[in-house]
Image (spheres, rainbow, N blue to C red):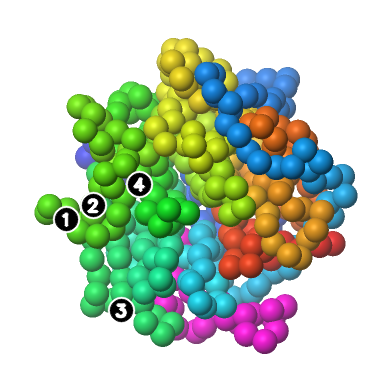
Amino acid sequence: MSTRTGRRPTGRRAGAPPAAPLSALAMVIALGLVATACAGSTPRTNPSTTSTTTPSSSSTTAGATTPAAGPDLGAVKLALTKLDGLNGPIALAVRPGDDALYVAEKTGRVRRVAQGQTPAKPTVDATPVLDLSGQVSTGSEQGLLGLTFSPDGSKLYVDYTDRAGDTQVVEYAFAGAKADGASRRTVLSVDQPFANHNGGEVAFGPDAKLYIGLGDGGSENDPNLIGQNQGTLLSKILRIDPTPSAGKGYTVPADNPFVGRAGVAPETFAWGLRNPWRFSWDRATGDLWIGDVGQDRWEEVDMRAPADAAGSNFGWSLMDATHPFHGTNPPGGVLPIVEYSHDGGNCAVTGGYVYRGPGIAALQGVYLYGDYCSGRVWGLVASAGKVVDRRQLDVGGTHPIFSFGEDAAGELYLLAADGLYRIGPA
């Protein structure tokens, strides 16, 4: 990886190779993304505890609404079905009123997967919906990282790192099955001080506002102490209205939690995040789930009920999961609902979704998430902000996990270095 002034390349975790053989292109992408997630070359000692569950906050309890009689994870049997024709799929979105899947490839293309009359054999359109291959940076944790559609389906939004390595959130008008390149409009640009921890999630929430995930700007150990700096856009989930106003490409919603607060970026929705690698909302309850990548020893999943999410401080870099890092948990700091160690080849959490589809009855209400390096997938059942059950699920194969995706019906997908997989019953 080349370096540029004021930036240094991200390190890779040692001892965490991808879990399955990959094609040449997929291997290149996979080796880069091992750092996605990760801190750097600091040696680590694996703790003996592989996972713990904790309250969701040091001061309040988030209220998930999973029924007390919740899902039985012991009854969950899953299998993966590969959908061919994609190279390094890293994010998935659906467009309202459209049965197709739209998939971002890390190298810069958005592809349309037409499901048609035979869902078991979808086809990838030959012509990309959008091709940014010449505009994205290609190092490790960089590239085309996220995409979403406006609630009415008329606009496509993408999140990528440009050739200088900085984050760009860009809007395109969408018609038929293609983005209109001439309609390109920059919504938000964010300078990235290092090449890693770029976040990359971009999604419309249940409130029809646009949410953008940004990491702490990179390197390891948060050298610029960004995690608890409320004046920057880094280390946060932002909440904006993408309508231009006052010389900006967006509008800050008046009900954002820090509007009018001196020294705090008004775009902030939640903060104290190291690298939020995928967040999502439970479509039945509105609970917000975040996979936040840890430093050298611990990975965490955070969960907040709708009434508690706005303004949440997830503690980085005073805390790394439930463990003191540069300090101790700040007042009101939100601790993860679950953490797990790097034992057994784990290295970087990939946040997922609460399953609400019709196809797998035993999975109803279960939050699925995974680890990039080990390829493990876990199911988690929560009630009253605490874990009721959590266990590793056998999905019929392990693949370096880039992301999860959800279609319009609530069925889930796994996006891996070697392709896109539908998650179904075994």
Q: Which residue is drawn at 74% across and 53% down?
A: 364
> Can you identify the residue that label 1 sits on?
245
Residue depicted at x 51% and y 60% = 91
Earlier-in-chain disc, 4 versus 1: 4
| Quarter of image, res 396 | bottom right
Using the numbered discs, state the Cα–Cα distance from disc 3 to disc 1 in whole angstroms: 22 Å
* Residue 379 screen position, x and y as percent: 73, 44
Residue to which mark 4 is pinned: 239
Q: Is residue 110 magenta?
A: yes
Count residues near mark 1 (Cα–Cα under 10 Å), then give few for <14, some for 14-19, many for 20+.
few
Splitting the image into 4 quarters, where does residue 323 fall? top right
For label 4, the SS is strand
Residue indicated by mark 3: 180
Vertical comparison of 106 with 352: above or below: below
Q: What residue type is labelled 4?
A: Arg
Q: Position of residue 227 (x, y in %)?
A: 37, 27
Sequence-earlier tag: 4 or 3: 3
Relative to 375, is 226 above or below? above
Q: Distance between the residues labelled 4 and 1?
A: 15 Å
Distance of label 4 from label 2 (alpha carbons): 10 Å
Which residue is nearer to you in this view: 143 or 76?
A: 76
- Residue 324 or residue 409, whichever sits in front: 409
| Any part of residue 121 in sight | yes
Mark seen at residue 420? none
Q: Identify the residue under disc 2.
A: 251
